[in-house]
């Protein structure tokens, strides 16, 4: 196999489309978000491209005994209301720095092919602790993009995310800007420890407001409830461990005075 191979699965016409990326990352926020878009808009979506690369991990996925080589997929979503979407999803990112550049360039080539000039990368920003209120932190390729996203509730914080944005989400902004794309990254706050459906919903609600389309969240909320149960059990175990540590006798406790 060549370093990069792109399968043209279908051809569709899109109306002023926007590239929306959600590959795996912190809290799986971006991948959860795009999976939910495709799940809720299944009737309006069409798989149009598969991108294979030796930069992906050397593995296949197996479903019902049938193996598929690891790849990224792009789905065209035709919306009755709002702009059409070109949704990028996959189970893996590249394993090397060169691979991130190669794949991001390919994704932008496909976006141009379908007439997209705007990009939204979706992901998470870690807080290191469990949170109740989910803010969405943003970064953009050009200052002119700040105000409309601020109006949609996105926060732009000085020097955050610390260390910048790595992987495809970051390169879509950097390489996208150099190629004339208007690009933004929407990052939902998340602990970074667990898959976070609530953070994915926060990001999607911003995307809905900006691109003017609507989603139903029942299935995502169900996943959030399941994660709440997991978090509750983790917190209960932590409390039990803390109590056990408090109950361990000290040297003073073990002294016998009589």
Image (spheres, rainbow, N blue to C red):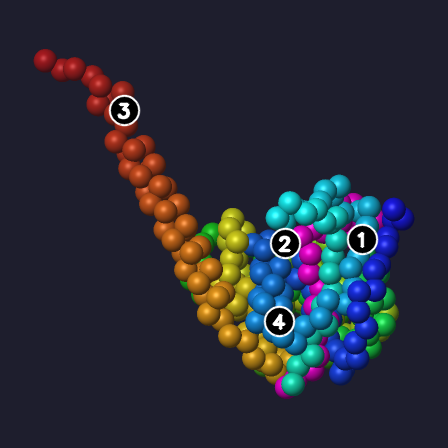
On the rendered image, what quadrant is the C terminus found in?
Answer: top left
Disc 4: CA contacts within 10 A as few (<14), some (14-19) or many (>=20): few
Q: Residue at x 27, y 20 (%)?
A: 251
Disc 3: CA contacts within 10 A as few (<14), some (14-19) or many (>=20): few
Residue on which the image places disc 1: 52
Where does the magenta region start and end?
81-100
Q: Residue at x 79, y 79 (%)?
A: 13
Q: Earlier in the sequence, mark 3 or mark 1?
A: 1
**Rendered view: 122 above or below 194:** below
Residue on which the image places disc 3: 250
Q: Nearer the viewer, residue 107 or 50?
A: 50
Q: Nearer the viewer, residue 101 or 56?
A: 56
Q: Mark 2 or mark 1: which is in front?
A: 1
Circle 3 sits in a helix, a strand or a loop, which is it? Answer: loop
Q: Earlier in the sequence, mark 4 or mark 3?
A: 4
Circle 1 sits in a helix, a strand or a loop, which is it? Answer: strand
* Image disc number at residue 42: 4
**Rendered view: 181 above or below 225:** below
Circle 4 sits in a helix, a strand or a loop, which is it? Answer: helix
Visible residue check, residue 176: no
Please check the rendered image and state whether residue 92 is part of the magenta-colored stretch, yes or no: yes
Q: Nearer the viewer, residue 244 or 91?
A: 91
Q: Earlier in the sequence, mark 2 or mark 1?
A: 2
Please check the rendered image and state whether residue 172 is part of the magenta-colored stretch, yes or no: no
Disc 1: CA contacts within 10 A as few (<14), some (14-19) or many (>=20): many
């Amino acid at each position: 196999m060549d370093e990069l191979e792109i399968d043209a699965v279908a051809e569709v016409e899109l109306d002023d489309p926007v590239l929306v990326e959600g590959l795996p990352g912190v809290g799986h926020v971006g991948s959860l978000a795009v999976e939910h878009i495709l799940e809720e808009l299944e009737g309006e979506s069409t798989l149009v491209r598969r991108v294979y690369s030796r930069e992906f991990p050397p593995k296949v996925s197996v479903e019902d005994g049938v193996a598929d080589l690891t790849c990224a997929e792009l789905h065209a979503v035709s919306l009755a209301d709002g702009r059409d979407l070109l949704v990028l999803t996959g189970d893996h990112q590249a394993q090397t720095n060169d691979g991130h550049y190669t794949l991001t360039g390919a994704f932008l080539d496909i976006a141009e092919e379908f007439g997209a000039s705007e990009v939204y990368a979706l992901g998470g920003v870690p807080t290191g602790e469990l949170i109740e209120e989910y803010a969405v932190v943003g970064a953009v390729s050009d200052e002119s993009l700040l105000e409309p996203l601020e109006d949609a509730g996105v926060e732009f914080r000085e020097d955050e995310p610390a260390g910048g944005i790595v992987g495809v989400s970051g390169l879509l902004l950097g390489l996208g800007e150099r190629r004339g794309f208007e690009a933004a990254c929407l990052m939902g706050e998340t602990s970074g420890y667990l898959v976070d459906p609530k953070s994915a919903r926060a990001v999607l609600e911003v995307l809905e407001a900006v691109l003017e389309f609507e989603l139903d969240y029942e299935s995502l909320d169900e996943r959030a409830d399941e994660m709440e149960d997991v978090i509750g059990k983790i917190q209960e175990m932590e409390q039990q461990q803390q109590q056990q540590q408090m109950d361990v006798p000290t040297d003073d406790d073990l002294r016998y005075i009589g």
